[in-house]
């Protein structure tokens, strides 16, 4: 067969295949087999079904497409270039090279048309569920009879590896429960993974598994049968009550004489000889790398005209909608633009030092509900922990399928039951929750949050890392933020989690010291252009007197909470340990030692401040410093300095009442004061007896001794 005798469909499909293997071969790196095997299903989807406009990748009512099998990135890059996105041929030729727009795995905000960053398998699967959730919420809130202005599908191509990952099981179960009928996934069922055939480790009946989740499943026996693929997608669109999984049986590396159907086509270039042999077998010119037949390109580029027409028709519907529903139209415009309503923070609650102590998780719940009244697209939920995380929006309704009743109860949080509900019940599914919240944020139009205990941030870290890589404005709430969790014991007491989260680039971590800092933390999170962690306490914390604070705002990351005329030492704390620093300051005053107390809720926000401000809070000349945080000390040495000390934890926690656990681990004002006096060489015998007799001093028995040493 030659290019002259191929049908137009075959010509276009082989264009995808050859374009992909040429780029992989030139880079001498990549995954050619998946684009070769999945080219036919991708072609049918992109040319016959996908509603998109290459000239405007951000058109709000476009269909979303996710390549969850991100290792096959050249499949997506080929489609983007061929259909007319701003991805020039020169960028394809620089696949996987420094500074190119075609990295090894697709990256959001890096390549036009890429919806989410994929690569870690299963994450894209979960992102798509979140996107479908966002579409359903916006449609339920804004569509009116005769005015359907939000109506689009979420598609993905998923792989064997995606379906093996546990996150996909969680996300699939959630999608099935929510009956997300506009979610359609094409499963590239090629029975090959990187190390061999899938029968080495994967023998389940995928269709039966997904049917049990509540999905609509279809089967395409031949991955090159265009009519069968077309009919399956059409049937999936017709199914409105269930998400759809289309099992498309493909051959990895299709067209390669030696490597087709083998794991040798999965993760390595075909090689020069095999590329030539493949082109010969498929009737392709062998002497023209990156050959693009004009007829194929013209066919693909019809997407520009059809996309412009579809977007224009939608714009007309929006204009008609605005005439009948002007307030709703303006609200939708603002939400899609990511804008916050005027005066959104004017109703934030405030607390006074005389008020009774309150856990920051409880304060956070009050702040969330105040904000929810001002920001109507603030939606989210927890991993079955609302009573503990205090993250339910009262009378906000439950995000559920209107056709599904939960034990006959019409709403668990008040406010009704349906897709317009603002409380999302993720179930005990932290992995899926993180990916879905990312997908909601990537979709746009909503401001999503999630919630669980800080210890379970370990389950969410892969999703949070990708959320940070994508600069998504998601808010991840974690309560029970220290060993003060108490009786639940070391399995539920975070130690290294804060340090690990702070190590993630682009992720802002905020650990507020009291209720007022919690309100400011929420405000700072909503103003971020990326993701934010709010780490909140289980135990009650006193309301701090900030009347003497210098420029005291969480948005600064750190500020002087209390000072002396001539401070000799700086006490730096975060969260619940800030109150300890204040108590330690009073004890130091009894020994004639002046101390500055710095509340540092966020390293990231502090580092973003101008150098003059950072110097004013932590002057280089003030070298005697004590940092205090009930967790691992990694990283705190940058603030303790060369002559400072870090008080933290080097072991796991223990099961006992939270206050006792904190004392046993040395988190007391006496201990902090002793550390400061020791730094200053002023730990007089009388003071030594007072402070060390109460907390065990340096001879406290490991592993319960806090970490205390020069950085």
Image (cartoon, helix red, strand yellow):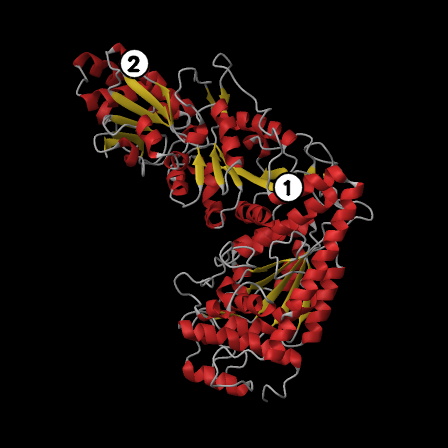
Q: Which residue lies furthest to the right in this view?
A: 146
- Mark 1 and mark 2 residues within 8 Å of each other at the beta carbon: no
> What x and y, as percent, mark residue 118?
51, 57
Identity of the residue drawn at 56% across and 74% down: 16
Foreground residue, 384 or 462?
A: 462
Q: Quadrant of residue 511?
A: top left
Q: Which residue is drawn at 41% across and 45% down?
A: 504
In front of the other: label 1 or label 2?
1
The disc placed on residue 20 is: none
Question: Tag 1, which secondary structure?
Answer: helix
The x, y position of residue 385, in whole percent, is 57, 36
- Which one is nearer the viewer's eye here, 666 or 702? 666
Upstream in sequence: badge 1 or badge 2: 1
Task: Classify mark 2: helix, strand or loop.
Answer: helix
Position of residue 693 measured from the top left corner of the image (x, y, whole percent):
25, 17
Residue identified by numbered label 1: 335
Mark 1 crowd level (few <14, some 14–19, many ≥20, 10 Å Cα): many
Disc assigned to residue 587: 2
For the N terminus, give its image quadrant.
Answer: bottom right
Q: Residues within 10 Å of mark 2 (few under 14, many from 20)?
A: many
Percent of width and height locating residue 156? 60, 60
Marks 1 and 2, how far apart in space?
51 Å
Q: Is residue 100 visible?
A: yes
Q: Residue at x 71, y 68 (%)?
A: 232
> Would you identify the image quadrant in which residue 342 lies?
top right
Q: In this view, does 529 lie above or below 125?
A: above
Image-based side of 341 in relation to 570, left or right: right
Question: Vertical placement of 617 versus 292: above or below?
Answer: above
């Amino acid at each position: 067969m030659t290019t002259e005798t191929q049908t137009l469909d075959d010509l276009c499909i082989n264009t995808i295949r050859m374009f992909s293997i040429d780029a992989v071969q030139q880079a001498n790196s990549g995954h050619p087999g998946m684009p070769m095997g999945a080219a036919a299903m991708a072609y049918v989807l992109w040319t016959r079904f996908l509603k998109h406009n290459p000239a405007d990748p951000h058109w709000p009512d476009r269909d979303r497409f996710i390549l969850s099998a991100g290792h096959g990135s050249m499949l997506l890059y080929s489609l983007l270039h061929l259909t007319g996105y701003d991805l020039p041929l020169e960028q394809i030729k620089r696949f996987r090279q420094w500074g190119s727009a075609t990295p090894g795995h697709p990256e959001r905000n890096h390549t036009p048309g890429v919806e989410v960053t994929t690569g870690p398998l299963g994450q894209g699967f979960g992102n798509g569920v979140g996107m479908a959730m966002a579409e359903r919420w916006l449609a339920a809130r804004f569509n009116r009879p005769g005015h359907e202005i939000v109506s689009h599908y979420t598609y993905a191509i998923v792989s064997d590896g995606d379906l093996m990952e546990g996150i996909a099981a969680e996300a699939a179960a959630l999608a099935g429960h929510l009956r997300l009928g506009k979610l359609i996934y094409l499963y590239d069922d090629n029975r090959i993974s990187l190390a061999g055939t899938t029968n080495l480790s994967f023998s389940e009946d995928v269709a039966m598994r997904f049917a049990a989740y509540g999905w609509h499943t279809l089967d395409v026996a031949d991955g090159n049968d265009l009519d069968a693929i077309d009919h399956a997608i059409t049937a999936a669109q017709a199914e409105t009550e269930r998400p759809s999984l289309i099992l498309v049986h493909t051959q990895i590396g299709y067209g390669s004489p030696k490597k087709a159907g083998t794991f040798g086509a999965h993760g390595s270039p075909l090689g020069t000889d095999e590329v030539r042999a493949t082109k010969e077998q498929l009737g392709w010119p062998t002497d023209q790398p990156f050959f693009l037949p004009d007829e194929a390109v013209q066919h693909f580029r019809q997407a520009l005209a059809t996309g412009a027409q579809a977007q224009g028709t939608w714009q007309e519907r929006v204009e008609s909608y605005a005439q009948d529903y002007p307030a709703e139209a303006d609200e939708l415009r603002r939400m899609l633009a990511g804008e916050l309503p005027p005066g959104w923070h004017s109703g934030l609650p405030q607390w006074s030092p005389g008020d009774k102590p309150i856990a920051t998780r409880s304060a956070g719940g009050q702040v969330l509900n105040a904000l929810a009244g001002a920001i109507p697209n603030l939606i989210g939920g927890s991993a079955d922990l609302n009573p503990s995380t205090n993250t339910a929006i009262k009378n906000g309704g439950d995000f559920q399928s209107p056709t599904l009743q939960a034990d006959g109860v019409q709403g668990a949080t008040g406010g009704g039951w349906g897709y317009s509900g603002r409380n999302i019940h993720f179930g005990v599914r932290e992995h899926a929750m993180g990916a879905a919240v990312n997908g909601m944020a990537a979709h746009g139009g909503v401001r999503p949050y999630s919630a669980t205990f800080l210890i379970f941030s370990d389950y969410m870290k892969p999703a949070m890392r990708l959320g940070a890589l994508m600069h998504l404005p998601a808010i991840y709430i974690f309560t029970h933020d220290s060993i003060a969790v108490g009786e639940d014991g070391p399995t539920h007491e975070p130690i290294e989690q804060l340090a690990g989260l702070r190590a993630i680039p682009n992720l802002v971590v905020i650990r507020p010291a009291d209720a007022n800092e919690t309100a400011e933390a929420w405000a700072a999170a909503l103003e971020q252009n990326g993701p934010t962690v709010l780490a909140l306490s289980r135990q009650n914390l006193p309301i701090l007197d900030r009347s003497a604070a210098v420029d005291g705002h969480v948005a600064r990351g750190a500020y002087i909470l209390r000072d002396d005329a001539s401070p000799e030492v700086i006490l730096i704390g975060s969260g619940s340990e800030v109150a300890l620093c204040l108590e330690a300051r009073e004890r130091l005053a009894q020994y004639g030692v002046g101390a500055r107390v710095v509340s540092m809720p966020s390293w990231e926000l502090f580092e973003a401040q101008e150098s003059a401000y950072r110097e004013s809070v932590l002057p280089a000349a003030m070298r005697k410093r004590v940092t205090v945080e009930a967790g691992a000390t990694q990283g705190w040495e940058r603030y303790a300095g060369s002559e400072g000390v870090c008080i933290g934890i080097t072991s796991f926690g223990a099961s006992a009442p939270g206050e006792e656990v904190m004392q046993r681990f040395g988190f007391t004002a006496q201990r902090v004061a002793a550390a400061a006096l020791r730094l200053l060489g002023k730990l007089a015998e009388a003071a030594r007896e007072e402070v060390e007799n109460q907390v065990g001093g340096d001879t406290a028995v490991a592993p319960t001794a806090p970490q205390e040493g020069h950085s």
